[in-house]
């Protein structure tokens, strides 16, 4: 049994912390929002009055927060109070630069640290089937792996500090672009008189195949579990896709990478969000491409 402090009990953090409880870890949680704490308490997370209180006696600290500034603020407060040899894990999706700053903070204090953003969404967080993309040194990865395995089914070591965040934004930039291309193909198929099922049957077994078609088809019918069958309720919200595409663009600019498809995907998701659709699933962007927004 490990004593774990879990900071940020939102849509992702609460079910992740619940899986740590299920695995038998003493899990103390904290969130600024009372209703988030109350929901997590129902699954056995012991609620602390502050991040510092959650941290007392913890071997591992996990943060699951909205953005880089929240993570840096939480780590600045918590790292100096952490027990000697403690491990800090950040599973939020944040910019690579902030992630590296957080690692540096931990290193100065002799703590182990890992960036470990996730793929799999709220469904994966609840089912304990997340993929963790990890950045940090070998010792931090080795210490974190058994803990992360209680919340996910794949834990990949991508490299040094910030490498997990780098892998996450590369993946999600690719996902944003393939989803848009998939939506374009289905919207064109509709105008050409193709049924959704016939186009799916061809694409899913042909060279245009991708996860966006086979697991998350943006039109109702072919993939029953996809959000397109339930009014585009997320799933993965368009606002979160926009966040990740912006992070990818910031990162691309910072290293001088050429990412025109990623830039266009960011623009299209910005339009989708500006049209009031940020809360819809990201596959709902098909409406924009049909000219129906
Ligand atoms: P969320 O907004 O539901 O949860 C974040 C929580 O952090 C909130 O409850 C907020 O009150 C809390 N918080 C903020 N500052 C805090 C502080 N200083 N101390 C304690 N609590 C604090 O967001 P989420 O959907 O759970 O996402 C969390 C992270 O995971 C984000 O970085 C997001 O990009 C990433 N992510 C989300 C999904 C998804 O499908 N929701 C998928 C993959 C990755």
Image (spheres, rainbow, N blue to C red):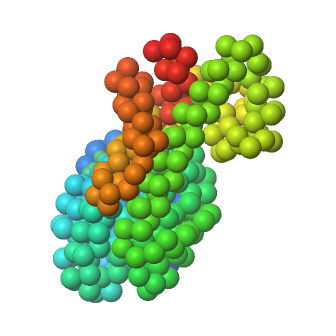
Residue 271 occupies which quadrant of the picture?
top left
> What residue sits 61% from the left and 53% below the top?
127
* Any part of residue 62 in sight: no
Q: Is residue 225 left or right of residue 152?
A: right
> Residue 172: image x %, image y %?
49, 49
The answer to whether residue 259 is above or below residue 30 is: above
The answer to whether residue 216 is above or below residue 231 is: below
Q: Is residue 209 left or right of residue 155?
A: right
* Any part of residue 133 in sight: yes
> Residue 38: image x %, image y %?
37, 46
Circle count: 0
Instruction: Judge by depth and name the residue closer to the eye, 187 or 109.
Output: 187
> What residue sits 50% from the left and 33% below the top?
282
> What residue sits 66% from the left and 25% below the top?
186
> Residue 220: image x %, image y %?
68, 24
The answer to whether residue 288 is above or below residue 202 is: above
> Residue 74: image x %, image y %?
23, 62
Q: Which corner quadrant holds the C terminus?
A: top left
The answer to whether residue 29 is above or below residue 209 is: below
> What residue sits 29% from the left and 44% below the top?
34
């Amino acid at each position: 049994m490990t004593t774990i402090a879990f900071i940020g009990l939102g849509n992702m953090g609460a079910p992740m912390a619940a899986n740590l409880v299920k695995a038998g870890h003493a899990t103390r949680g904290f969130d600024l929002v009372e209703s988030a704490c109350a929901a997590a308490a129902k699954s056995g997370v012991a609620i602390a009055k502050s991040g510092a209180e959650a941290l007392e006696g913890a071997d591992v600290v996990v943060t699951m927060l909205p953005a880089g500034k929240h993570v840096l603020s939480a780590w600045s407060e918590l790292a100096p109070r952490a027990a000697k040899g403690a491990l800090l894990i950040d599973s939020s999706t944040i910019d690579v630069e902030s992630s590296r700053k957080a690692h540096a903070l931990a290193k100065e204090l002799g703590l182990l640290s890992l960036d470990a953003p996730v793929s799999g969404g709220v469904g994966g967080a609840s089912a304990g089937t997340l993929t963790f993309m990890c950045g940090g040194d070998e010792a931090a990865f080795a210490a974190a792996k058994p803990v992360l395995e209680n919340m996910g089914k794949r834990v990949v070591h991508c490299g040094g500090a910030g490498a997990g965040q780098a892998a996450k934004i590369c993946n999600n930039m690719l996902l944003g672009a393939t989803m848009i291309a998939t939506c374009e193909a289905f919207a064109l198929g509709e105008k050409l008189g193709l049924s959704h099922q016939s186009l799916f049957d061809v694409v899913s077994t042909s060279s245009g195949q991708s996860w966006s078609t086979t697991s998350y088809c943006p039109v109702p019918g072919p993939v029953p579990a996809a959000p397109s069958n339930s009014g585009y309720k997320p799933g993965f919200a368009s606002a979160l896709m926009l966040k990740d595409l912006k992070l990818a663009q910031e990162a691309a600019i910072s290293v001088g990478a050429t990412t025109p498809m990623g830039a266009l995907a960011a623009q299209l998701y910005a339009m989708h969000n500006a049209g009031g659709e940020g809360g819809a699933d990201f596959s709902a962007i098909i409406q924009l491409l049909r000219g129906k927004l």
